[in-house]
Amino acid sequence: ETGVTQTPRHLVMGMTNKKSLKCEQHLGHNAMYWYKQSAKKPLELMFVYNFKEQTENNSVPSRFSPECPNSSHLFLHLHTLQPEDSALYLCASSQKHSAGGETQYFGPGTRLLVL
Amino acid sequence: DAKTTQPPSMDCAEGRAANLPCNHSTISGNEYVYWYRQIHSQGPQYIIHGLKNNETNEMASLIITEDRKSSTLILPHATLRDTAVYYCIVRVRSYNTDKLIFGTGTRLQVFP
């Protein structure tokens, strides 16, 4: 248990569906991240939020829409996805400007299958 | 691209020390070396990190060479539950954002 929770853990959706992934951190951190891990590929950073402001968008298609209403919650809204978007989506959080480095702690991930 | 290179796989006997090497020859002076591991289909688990000095915690030890161009993660007494993919990562800073750029890691197999 890392203090970062993600729901749902598994999701199957059609290409015309709209769904949202939720991440919540209980660590008092002020930065949150979305990563994507496709089969047999390294984790890819998608979005970064610092103090609720988006500071990084790693050329992610607009069918992925992040939302960070406060420093404890992060959402990833999904619409009109493609089968190649099937992957493990991971959320992480960290405390910016902390002494000794800013360690990111990951949630368990949401396994997404797009049909 | 990841700034680290690791062997794709390693084996280790249970109870023995597992020594996982990592090369990061282009590391900058203020960039930390982080180690994470990922057990199949779970989120990456933080293990340890360091800047210049060797570090030890309850999970592992991190040995960083004096020139900082390589490091070794040591699991002193490997167990079957340590079977996982181990990632060595150089944390880079870009536009006030800290990034962990994951490579393909080392798949450690601990056998009985």
Image (tube, coloured by chain):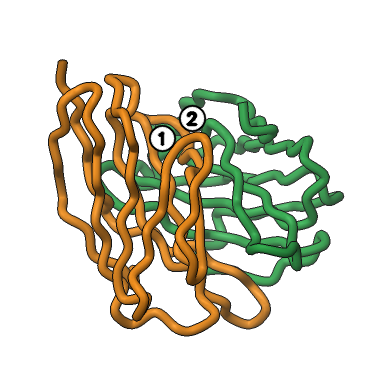
Chain colours: A green, B orange
Image x and y of residue B61, in percent: 42, 47
Q: Is residue A83 left or right of residue A47?
A: left
Image x and y of residue A54, in percent: 72, 66
Tell me which corner region of the image, top left, top right, bottom left or bottom right, holds residue B79. top left
In the rendered image, residues at marks 1 and 2 fall on the same chain = yes
Chain of the residue under label 2? A
Distance from label 1 to label 2 (Cα)? 5 Å
Q: In this view, does B102 lie to the left or right of A94?
A: left
Q: In this view, does B9 lie to the left or right of A47?
A: left
Using the image, tell me which numbered label, if any, was put on residue A13.
2
Instruction: Sort mark 1 into few (<14), some (14-19) or many (20+) by Cα contacts within 10 Å.
Output: some
- Residue beneath the point at 74% across and 52% down: A67
Q: Is residue B91 visible?
A: no
- Residue beneath the point at 23% across and 65% down: B5
Q: Can residue B51 be seen in this view?
A: yes
Image x and y of residue B77, in percent: 31, 29
Using the image, tell me which numbered label, if any, was put on residue A36.
none
- Residue beneath the point at 26% across and 54% down: B104
Residue lying farthest to the right in this orientation: A70
**Dividing the image into 4 quarters, which one contains the C terminus of chain B?**
top left
Which mark sits nearer the N-terminus, 1 or 2? 2
- Residue beneath the point at 51% across and 75% down: B31
Q: Mark 1 points at which residue?
A: A114
Element type at mark 1: strand
Chain of the residue under label 1? A
Q: In this view, does B17 lie to the left or right of A86?
A: left
- What is the three-letter code of the residue carrying label 2? Met
Q: How many marks?
A: 2
For the residues labelled 1 and 2, say whether their Cβ atoms are less than 8 Å apart.
Answer: yes
Element type at mark 2: strand
